């Protein structure tokens, strides 16, 4: 797994530690959640570029269970950038 300009900055150790509360560390969901915890958030395009699959279901489940909060970061582009914050 390689983070590039197209995928945005690599999540910090802290973001990966927070993500481990919600997904197995060897899963794509884990990486997706860690990316969403970054201050700049994440877009579906970034996730698909990095992992080859959108990994939306786990984030939807966490939002439905109210385990995380979602913030939409206005970007003025064609995609929505979301940021998750643990509750």
Image: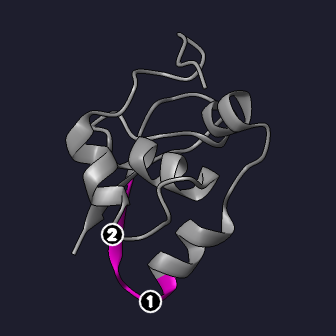
Q: Secondary structure at mark 2?
A: loop
| 61 over 82 or under it: above or below | below
Q: Is residue 3 magenta?
A: no
Q: Is residue 73 visible?
A: no
**Residue 4 falls in image quadrant:** top right
Q: Position of residue 78 (x, y in %)?
A: 66, 32
Observer-nearest of 80 and 51:
51
Q: Is residue 14 visible?
A: yes
**Residue at the spot 62% in from the left edge and 51% down from the top edge:** 28
**Residue at the spot 27% in from the left edge and 58% down from the top edge:** 18
State the separation of the CA atoms marked 2 and 1.
Answer: 14 Å
Please give left or right for residue 49 compared with residue 73 in the image.
right
Q: Position of residue 87 (x, y in %)?
A: 21, 75
Report which residue position mark 2 lands on.
21
Please give left or right for residue 85 compared with residue 57 in the image.
left
Observer-nearest of 1 and 82:
1
Q: Position of residue 5 (x, y in %)?
A: 53, 10
Q: Is residue 67 magenta?
A: yes
Labels 2, 1: front one: 2
Q: Position of residue 2 (x, y in %)?
A: 58, 18
Q: Please, which residue is most extreme toward the bottom here?
A: 65
Q: The N terminus lies in which quarter of the figure? A: top right
Report which residue position mark 1 lands on.
65
Observer-nearest of 10 and 8:
10
**Residue at the spot 67% in from the left edge and 70% down from the top edge:** 57
Q: How is the image coloured?
A: one colour
Residue bounds of the magenta highlight: 64-71
């Amino acid at each position: 797994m390689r983070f590039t300009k197209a995928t945005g900055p690599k999540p910090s150790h802290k973001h990966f530690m927070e993500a481990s509360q919600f997904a197995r560390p060897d899963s794509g969901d884990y990486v997706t959640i860690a990316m969403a915890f970054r201050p700049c958030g994440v877009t579906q395009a970034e996730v698909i570029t990095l992992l080859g699959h959108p990994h939306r279901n786990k984030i939807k489940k966490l939002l439905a269970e109210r385990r995380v909060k979602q913030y939409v970061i206005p970007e003025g582009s064609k995609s929505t950038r979301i940021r998750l914050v643990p509750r």
